[in-house]
Image (cartoon, grey):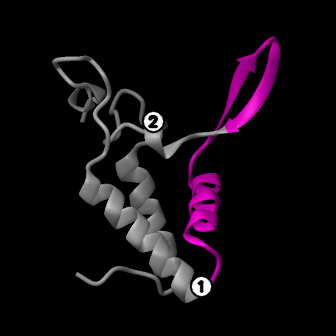
Amino acid sequence: MSLLADICPTCGHRKPRSKPQNSRYWALLTKASEKLGHSKDVWHVFLVDKFLPMRIVLICGQEKLIRTSTHNLPMHPDINRPNDPSWETYTLQVEAFLSEHGVYLEH
């Protein structure tokens, strides 16, 4: 799917993930917290660091390595940029990793 599907045709801004998608993600992190320990915020940072690439930004002439934000991820992978992260790919990786540790959401 193209990134164009993630862009609002009216204002041109990237569409955010839906509230149900966000709620599901944080519910999964809450389950991880309850089952494996640590806060859901610690799990979020751990999983972002595990599955999303770091970026180099230039600030006042200095290069700084920063974490990719899940807020800025496109919803779906872009077939023209298969190595770029997406929310869909990230959450699939998170669910697979946590399921290996016995953490999953009931359907």
Q: Residue lying furthest top in this view?
A: 61
- The residue to which callout 2 is attached is 72
Residue 46 against residue 54 in the figure, above or below: below
Relative vertical location of residue 46 with respect to residue 71 in this rendering, above or below: below
* Residue 45: mark in rendering: none
Q: Residue furthest right?
A: 62
Residue 92 position within the rendered picture, expressed as x and y whole percent measured from the top left: 39, 61
Q: Quadrant of residue 5?
A: top left
Task: Point out the image quarter for the N terminus.
Answer: top left
Q: Is residue 43 magenta?
A: yes
Nearer to us in this view, 107 or 77: 107
Query: Which percent across, then down, holds residue 51?
Result: 57, 54
Q: Amino acid at mark 2?
A: Asn
Q: Residue visible at 47% across and 36% down?
A: 84
Q: How many marks?
A: 2
Q: Is residue 106 left or right of residue 52?
A: left
Give percent across and percent down for residue 57. Answer: 69, 23
Q: Is residue 91 left or right of residue 4?
A: right
Crowd class of label 2 (few under 14; some 14 to 19; many from 20; radius 10 Å): some
Secondary structure, mark 2, is helix
Which residue is labeled 1 in the image? 36
Q: Identify residue type, mark 1.
A: Leu
Question: Alpha-carbon neighbours of circle 1 within 10 Å: few (<14), some, or many (≥20)?
Answer: some
Image quarter where the C terminus lies is bottom left
Residue 53 falls within the magenta-colored stretch: yes
Report if residue 22 is visible in the image: yes
Q: Residue at x 47, y 75 (%)?
A: 30
Residue depicted at 21% across the width and 25% down the height: 8
Q: CA distance from mark 1 to mark 2?
A: 28 Å
- Region in magenta: 37-66
